[in-house]
Amino acid sequence: MILVFSLMGSLIASAMLFVFPFAVLAYFFAPPPFNLRIDNPQTLPVIVAFVVVSIVGKHLIEKVRRERNVALEAAARLRRGEAELRDREKQWREIFEHNPVMHFMVNATGMVLNVNTFGATQLGYAPSELVGHSVLKVFLEEDRPFVRERVGLCIETVGQSHTWEIQKIRKDGSVLWVRENAKAMQWAEDKLVVLIACEDITERKRTETALRRSEAHLAQAQELSRTGSFGWNVATGEVYWSKETFRIFQYDPSTKPTPQLVVDRTHPEDRAAVRETIDRAFQNEEDFEHEYRLLMPDGSVKHLHALARAIRTASGDIEFVGAVTDITAAKQAEQQLRRSEAYLAEAQHLSHTGSWSWDVHRREFVYRSAENDRLFGFDPQEALSIETIRSRIHPDDLPRLQEVPRQAIEDKGGHFEYDFRILLPDGAIRRIHSVAHAVVGSDGKVSELIGTHMDVTEQHAARERLERALAALRESEQRFRDYAETASDWLWETGPDHRITRISEHTSAAILTTKVVGLLRWEIAHDVETEPEKWRQHRATIDARLPFRDFIYRTVTQMGSTIYVRTSGKPFFDADGNFLGYRGVSTDITATIRADQAERELRKAQAELAHVTRVTTLGELTTSIAHEINQPLAAIVTNGEACLGWLGRETPDLSAARRSVEWIIEDGIRASEVIRRIRALAKKGEIEMVPLDVNDIVKEVIALVTRELVSHQVSLRTELTPALPLILGDRVQLQQVITNLVMNGIEAMQTVSDRPRELVIRSSHDDMGRVHLAVADCGVGITEDDADRVFNPFFTTKSSGLGMGLSICRSIVEAHGGSLSIARKQEPGATFQFVLPLHKEVVS
Amino acid sequence: MSTPPLIAIVDDDGSVRAAINNLLKSRGYIVHTFVSAEEFLRSPHLNGTSCVIADVQMSIMSGLDLLTHMRDQGYGAPFIFITAFPDDRVRDRALSAGAICFLAKPFSGQHLIRCLDTALDKHRGGASA
């Protein structure tokens, strides 16, 4: 090296200027030995030419040339330059000593051979305190092996530079960070020295430590905030991920990060969007921000939020620098919140309750829940004018609603509950129950009303239905009360002990005194003693808790008059079936009873009258009856004598006698039959309603009137419909009616001589099953005037008779539920006919 | 009694007719019975009848009408009337018209026989005269 330098020295002297500082550095370590030998005159011009710039070269050249030019060096020149060199040497020494870089020179054992003053001072030592001591003295105990190892390394690799950073210990114990640059070099024949330049990097180290600490803090912050950072140089494709970014993506930190890794981890559903975002950012070189999900190897899902800025680097490339945050927790919280909100909304929806907040001064909604909008039929996005809101409120309810905020402002607070109706655009009405609370601001004034609107339309409808049902029930009750009151004079109720607990008399006349309450029902009756059996049966009925109907008893009104009461009752029980008493209705039927009695009297009179007329008829029939009886009697007597005749013969004819007796018997029966019929007609018996065949009655009547027909030269024609339905009637009375009609017919034809006197008796039945019977004559007939009067009592055209016949007949027929009338006809004469209802019991 | 007298009975009541027929036969008379005057009038025995015993009250032609009709026709057979309606006016009319007897039912058989005998005597006398 020294040789090269010396050769090169004269040729590239100017170039040497550039390496001067390095030469100086190397050179100062060995000036004393060189100084002694600088006396080569050839080198002087060179040295002169490079006075300042190439001392190293001069020394090296001197060293190289020392053996060749030793003798050549002129002592004079040496002497001449000696002082100058000494100055220079001193000068360089000063430079070396005060060079603001610490320099050590140690031997292979680490012993300090030299140290510059600056360096020693920096360490708080005098150079003499260090020279001759182990260099380890200025190192931390723990660093000493490293120092030893480093020195060893330099020794082994002579000529090679080694750099490291290490702390040095000042004399006062404080620490100094140095960057050491060391190299071993051959010094003397076989001696190796290690030259070490120590750059004070304490400040840098401090900065570095601070930086490292910041980085640590950042890393911790990233970890804590679950935010990773990343860098992406689009041009170079170089990607930087922070530790946290690796952790978020769950990649090994040793992995080389690429955008593809991001895509690989992305949830399949978000992959396309992520790729698109990245591509767009890549193409447009613009900031991007996106949220996406990761599908982790364990199947879990992470939500990420990534934000990146496009930054132009010094080299003009675009680099994206960004942060990626694991927002899974936030997302979950958000989802949780959304869910809660959804639950709340759902709850509001389900309960038809909307919540709202109303600014009482600005008169607008500060907040309105979705359900609130639904109730009003508002679009959630819609900005609501006060007019719109008012338009949805029933005009009748608007003043009340407006009163609430006014009241709240006036009272400076308050709690309100009110009802109103929402009028929807389609005309539907919602009924709202509202609860509101005034919010008082820090100024003590009401700022807002917060509240809820609950849709109570259904409840209202239900209540209305209930009210309607109740009204219907009340009406029903009233209806039944009306029925009961109409059908009775008073209602009563007894307890389980049959004592009267309630009397509600609704007739205008107070019949019973209210004093009867508390009495037993039979204590107010006045016929218990006279009709014990009736009451005994009644008591048995109510003891058996059976309903009873139309029980009639006698009592006395509070006015003291006797009345007859008809009462019906029904036991009533509680839900468990316990007997609670009777409820019933009572009616004063005194008038009815009296009427019944009157009717019975009338019936009796009518029956007697009928009897009288029957007897009268019998009187009229006397000759016929006599004839009917005398005929068989005549036969009997005659046959008896004939019998005697047959027996009185010389040879009695017994068979003829026997025959005669038989005839006697037959005629006797015939006679008694006639008498029976007459007795039946004459009988004054009770009316006996039995099922009857009208044809049978007709035949019986014919038997009675045959002689009358004969004697009046009237021929009888019967047209009897066979198998007539049975009617319910009294045989004798119906015989009387028919006999009467027949007799009238016979009499009506009394004067007829120009035509056959024919009487027709016709029986039939109609579609309704009623039985018709007609008696037609061809007599004088009945004039129009008489037709209206023939049924009147005492009307008669006959010279004899009471004129009661047809009147009685009509009464009898009507008593049988039928009617008696005159039928119009073209031919001469009259036809009387009656219709009788069929006997339903027999039919059914 | 070379020729037994023929007696005609006219009565619409079968029992009475049969009873009189029975009585008279028991006494040995020859009797013909008729249910009505018209039937008797159509009878071939009309001329040979010695006595007519007739009911007064019969439909269409009464006993009295029959008597009148017979007399008008020139038949002189004596009449004995029997009736269940003993009416004095009818009795008077019957007797004045020439009836032998007017008997009210029921009558005694012997009374009828006596009347019959009287009538037959009269008829025989009349016939012989």
Image (spheres, rainbow, N blue to C red):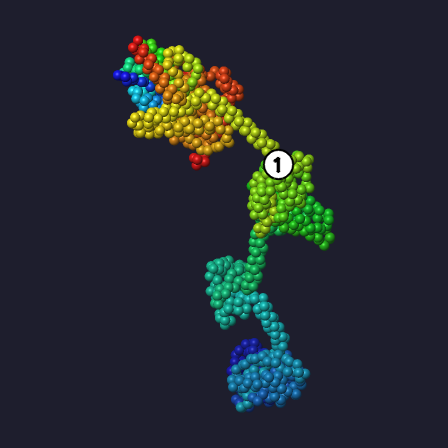
**Which quarter of the figure has residue B87?**
top left
A436 relative to B118 in the view: left or right: right
**Residue B102 appears at what percent x and percent y?**
39, 16
Q: For mark 1, does the 10 Å Cα neighbourhood hold few (<14), some (14 to 19), or many (20 or more) residues?
A: many
**Residue A734 appears at what percent x and percent y?**
46, 27
**Which amino acid, by three-letter code, is at mark 1?**
Tyr
A186 relative to A630 in the view: left or right: right
Nearer to me, A733 or B59 = B59
Nearer to me, A651 or A443 = A651
Residue A639 visible in the shown view: no
**Residue A94 appears at what percent x and percent y?**
65, 82
Residue found at x 67% / y 85%: A126
Task: Say above or below: B113 vs A690.
Answer: above
Q: SS for tag 1?
A: strand
**Residue B43 appears at what percent x and percent y?**
29, 16
Task: Say above or below: A160 vs A479.
Answer: below
**Which quarter of the figure has residue A66?**
bottom right
Read off the residue under disc 1: A564
The quadrant in which the C terminus of chain A is found is top left
Task: Say above or below: A180 vs A730.
Answer: below
**Which quarter of the figure has residue B21?**
top left
Residue found at x 56% / y 30%: A600
Nearer to me, A380 or A126 = A380
Nearer to me, A357 or A577 = A577
